[in-house]
Amino acid sequence: METPQPTEPVPDVNEVSRQTMVDDLLLISHESADAATLTTNSSQAQILTALADLSTAQKNSIGGVYTSGLPDAPTASASPSPTTTDSAPQDPTPASVIGKLSDSALRIRSALAVPTDADLARAYASLAISHMNSARSLAKKFDISFQVPSEFESDAWAQPDFLDEQDVIDLVRAEDAAGYAFEVIAAMQNPDARDRALKAARLHRAFAADLAASAGIVGTHKDPRLVAYELPFTLTADQPLAPSKELKALAQELESSLAGDYLSLIDSVDPESRMLLLDLAMSRGMLAADWGATLGEFPFLGNGETVSSSATAQD
């Protein structure tokens, strides 16, 4: 009976960052659901409701609202905090939802060095990609002007010295192979449909060349670039060109694989360098979406258990 009453534990930096993600997801979910109830267009309402459901699922996957189980203990993130302003709050709109998604993605980027758990950081980076993909998708469907914030548009590194040499070599090969594949995709398309594939080919080839030059492996035995790469097409004399559906599927796979490569390296770099990897993963992830890839709840994570297991470890 003399044992002191248990007290509310002090959250560590991992739990603080997790609670911030939960707050953002709650806000996005509520804003989307409210905007859905205010529109008279049923198809638009379905789109907003789907986003609300996605945000709720993501919130639950990272552990949801924290509750200690102690009597009379405050709930850490029961609902999104209202913003204090001198004016009356505005009704949620698709544009305001897009703003919340973009703001949350930028917040993740700026705080990606905070978690000491690299798996959590990787899950949050994936969440930022999901937010940006949702924002772009909403903008397109609601005919709202939107651009990916310039903070995410860093498509080159001055020096790749924050990565192990073998990781750099692997990235050079993967980017160069993607460039070659997009050249083939372009060649197999009608002339009036080649521009997007050719643009992707130039981007990946150029990034591979810059990365190889920055790493000092150009012209050495470490340079992994090949003249040609094997592609997963089954061609015959009667069918010398791959069907457009197969070309599109390969394009999706190429960009998705690269996005996953960059996200996976978040586990192995110093915390301050994580955002550089997020920028490249964001770039490749948006390209994958442009080719029609479905990004899912946590895009490009190689192990779906990472999200729930890392969040559970913080409880």
Image (spheres, helix red, strand yellow):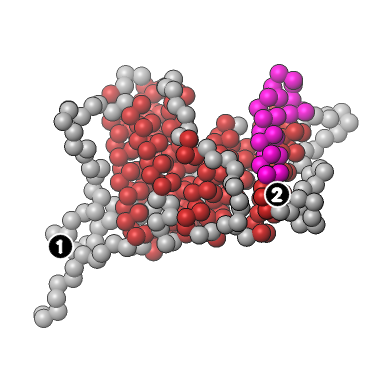
Say what secondary structure mark 1 lies in.
loop
User: At x 57% / y 57%, what residue is drawn?
Assistant: 162
Q: Is residue 271 something that shows in the picture? A: yes
- 293 falls in the magenta region: no
Q: Which mark is residue 71?
A: 1
- The one nearer the camera, 242 or 220, is 220
User: At x 89% / y 31%, what residue is drawn?
Assistant: 237
As drawn, 66 above or below 250? below
Q: Is residue 137 something that shows in the picture? A: no
User: At x 61% / y 51%, what residue is drawn?
Assistant: 159
- What amino acid is labelled 2 in the image? Ala
Residue 283 rendering spot, x and y as whole percentages: 55, 39
Of badges 2 and 1, the one in the foreground is 2
Q: Which residue is mark 2?
A: 212
Residue 2 rendering spot, x and y as whole percentages: 11, 81
Q: Quadrant of the N terminus?
A: bottom left
**In the rendered view, does 257 fall on the left or right side of 49?**
right
Displayed quadrant of residue 115: bottom left
State the separation of the CA atoms marked 2 and 1. Answer: 59 Å
Which mark sits nearer the N-terminus, 2 or 1?
1
- What amino acid is labelled 1 in the image? Pro
Image marks 2 and 1: residues in contact by CB distance under 8 Å: no
The segment highlighted magenta reads: 186-210
Q: Main secondary structure of the magenta part?
A: helix
| Label 2 CA crowd tier, 10 Å (few <14, some 14–19, many 20+) | many
Q: Quadrant of the C terminus?
A: bottom left
Displayed quadrant of residue 250: top right
Say what secondary structure mark 2 lies in.
helix
**In the rendered view, does 255 fall on the left or right side of 52?**
right
Residue 22 rendering spot, x and y as whole percentages: 33, 48
